[in-house]
Structures are given as structure tokens and as C-alpha cells.
Image (cartoon, helix red, strand yellow):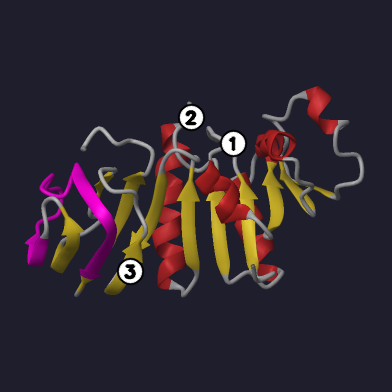
Amino acid sequence: MSQSTFTILLGGELSLTERLRHAIAGTRFIAADGGMRHALALGVTPELWVGDFDSTPADLDGAFPHVPKQPYPAAKAATDGEIAVSEAIARGAGRLILAGALGGERSDHALQHLLSAVSLAEEGFDVLLTSGKEEAVPLLAGTIELDLPKGSLFSVPGFSELKGLSIENARYPLKDFHLPFGSSRTISNVAEGKVRFSLTSGRAIVLARPYDLSGV
């Protein structure tokens, strides 16, 4: 995998699934504060560790004595995750995998990660958010395709009004659909295999649960 792909280790939940291991294989790693605990579970050594370290257990610090630390004060204008992403971009990242971005105790952080991913996609970055069991990718004007197991669940919440939304190879397909902002019409669909999404205008996120085959 290209060295321009960075995995940002964030503080949310992370399950060590095969899809996760495949996604991060060969990438470079930057840890944000307590997200470093995932480095131990994954058996990787990040090239940088950033944050105010308010959520880092004391015993974790000694496990990575040679990883450069970049400390910030708690009263800062950006989250540790945003700082880690900025450092990855400064090192030439073109693709970003935000691992531990979904779920966990802080729903405010999870929501911010989704919004940030859409903003990064608008800037031209390829972004994947993952908890191992759940994945998310931004959907902007254009077309994307996700390789999902048949029967797995996915949703497409809109962050704005969506125009020209098409969903192909799903149980509930759509073609050139207008989705009002706040509508639940695109929540809980079922993949028939690779799903193709097209959008004329708007901002959305595709949230998929590849291991949830309750839709079979």
C-alpha cells in the first residue's frame, strides 16, 4: 500500500477484524492520545504520538519509549484527533484511515469525526472511518463503490439535502432520488454485494456494518 496512507489511532472502540487488518496493512501510523492503546493490540509502532495525554494510562507511556511525543495543552483549539490528522497531512497523506473513530463513550467525538471526514473529502482526501465492525465513508457529488458482504446492513444519513441520490445493488435501490435534510428514508438498507452510490449534490456519509448480516 502507498506510503501516503496514514492510519490515525483514535480513542474510540476498535475490534480487530479481518477487514480492519486488511485496511491498515502497510500504512503509516500516528496515535492521538489514548488511541495509542490500539497500537498495542494491533502490534504496530506509530511514528508520532500527539495530544494533551489526559486519556493516556500511565502504564501505556512506558510501552512506547522511542515513539516521539508531541504534547499539547489541554486548553487547545483542536481535538487530539484533528491534530493527528494535520500531522499526517503534513507528512504527505493522501488517504486517511481513522481507526477508533466510531462508537465509544464520547458521541460528540464520534460525530465530529464524521463531520471532519466529510470536510476532508471535500478537500480531496480519501477517508475511511472504522471501528473494525462498523465503517464509514463520505459521499459527495460523484460515485463511490463499497465492497460489502451480501446481507450486511448500511445506511446513508445526509448532512444536507441530497439531490440525485442513486443506490445500486441493494435491497432497497434508489435512482436519482431527492432526500430532504433530516429524512430517515436512507436508514437501514441491505447490501446485495458491492454497492454503488451516486450523488448529484449534497453531503452524506455511508455507514456500513459488514459483519452484521441480520438483513439476510
Label 1 or label 3, whichever comes before in sequence order: 1
- Residue extending farthest to the right is 66
Q: Look at 34% across and 49% down and name the residue there.
A: 149
Q: Residues within 10 Å of mark 3 (few under 14, many from 20)?
A: some
**Callout 3: helix, strand or loop?**
strand
Q: Are marks 1 and 3 in contact (CB under 8 Å)?
A: no
Type of residue at label 1? Gly
Is 196 magenta? The answer is: yes
Q: Residue at x 31, y 54 (%)?
A: 206
Left or right for 21, reference 183: right
- Whether residue 157 appears in this view of the structure is no
Local crowd size for mark 2, using a 10 Å CA cut-off: few (<14), some (14–19), many (≥20): some
Residues marked 1 and 2 touching at CB (< 8 Å): yes
Report the mark closest to the observer, 2 or 3: 3
Residue marked by disc 3: 144
Image x and y of residue 93, in percent? 63, 69
Q: Residues within 10 Å of mark 1 (few under 14, many from 20)?
A: many
Name the residue type under label 3.
Answer: Ile
Q: Circle 1 sits on which residue?
A: 11
Picture quadrant where residue 2 is located? bottom right
Span shown in magenta:
174-198
Q: Magenta span has 188?
A: yes
x, y percent for residue 46: 76, 50
Q: Which residue is mark 2?
A: 104
